[in-house]
Amino acid sequence: MARSTPLAALSCLILLNCLKPLISWPANDKHASDMSQPDFDQYLGDYLKPGDTVALLLDYDGTLAELTSHPNLTQMSDEMRESLRNIANSGKAFVSVISGRDVDGVKEKIGINNIIYSGNHGLEVLYPNGTRHNQGIPKDVADNFDKMIDHLNREVVHHGSWVENKRVSITFHFREAEQKYVPEMAARAKEIIESYGYRANPAHASVEGKPPIQWNKGLAAEYILGSSFDPNWRTRKVLFAGDDTTDEDVMKMIKGTGRSFRVTKDKDLVTNADYKIPSVDAVYHLLKWIESRVV
């Protein structure tokens, strides 16, 4: 009888691993297998039991809807919307969407009434009953807002770039700009934004200009959870999914108590999330899994 060799044993192990379907991998494991079929039981089965109450926090662009060349073109699929609505109506789930869009814009895109929307990376909160909570912006900075937009439009809007006015913050988009102009226009946009007292942060094919206040999606999530879900929310079940660097603040905030997913295909990306999932479609499978637990 032939003796087993180390190479044969390794080949067998690889074959067994390849046969095991994965939807996610440990967030910072560069050697993890590619993902195929959803199996969220493996990652959340021991955390969220059938009938448990859960707080579900989500980003919108790149998470619930595919990224597009222009924000106006993004659409949430009917299937995604139906699953999110079923979760929100289950009586077992608290749902909030925290987006970089302005708060009315993200509510219009999703169109579900009984969830809490937060816009401008948490600066605005819109409740189901129509009441709002906005973080205060210093008057001298707010007075510079229109001047900043005018300056950006005059100097760096060209060859496909444009400025999105979100009322209390802006995004300078260059996804459709000619690549040879991008480094210079992005650097100059950052300088202009900062010259008017706003913070300039890199994002997906864009530079965001935000008021200089100590606030982010993580602090917004903490405020929403504590004021509208449960003051002792750290003892409850909390899930979050997002695709951008601005979502890392939420992942960091719930780390150790909640569970979070970074939507990315980049295995080398280091993240505060517990797991990575590769696509908006994988987020849909995540929602369907949650729906099976709470509905």
Image: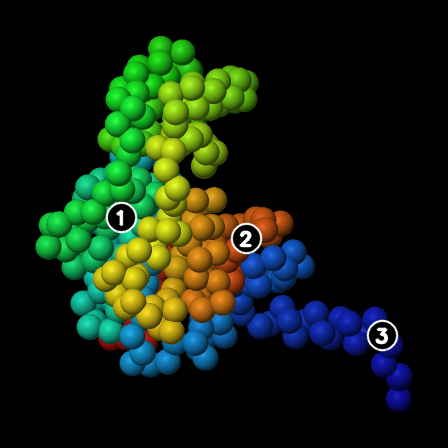
Which residue in the protein does label 2 denote?
271
Classify 217 as above or below 19: above
Question: At label 1, which amino acid type do we have?
Answer: Ser
Please report the residue visible at 65 percent of the width from the left and 75 percent of the height from the top. Answer: 16
Label drawn at residue 6: 3
Residue 145 visible in rendering: no
- Mark with earlier residue (2, 1): 1
The earlier-in-sequence mark between 2 and 3 is 3
Residue where numbered disc 1 is placed: 118
| Quadrant where the N terminus is found in the figure | bottom right
Q: Would residue 275 appear left or right of 57 to someone viewing this image?
A: right
Q: Position of residue 40 (x, y in %)?
A: 45, 70
User: Could you tell me the amino acid type at mark 3?
Assistant: Pro
Residue at x 29% of width, y 53% of height: 97
Q: Quadrant of residue 57?
A: bottom left
Rounded to the nearest whole Å, what is the CA distance between mark 2 and mark 3? 35 Å
Q: Is residue 177 left or right of residue 220?
A: right
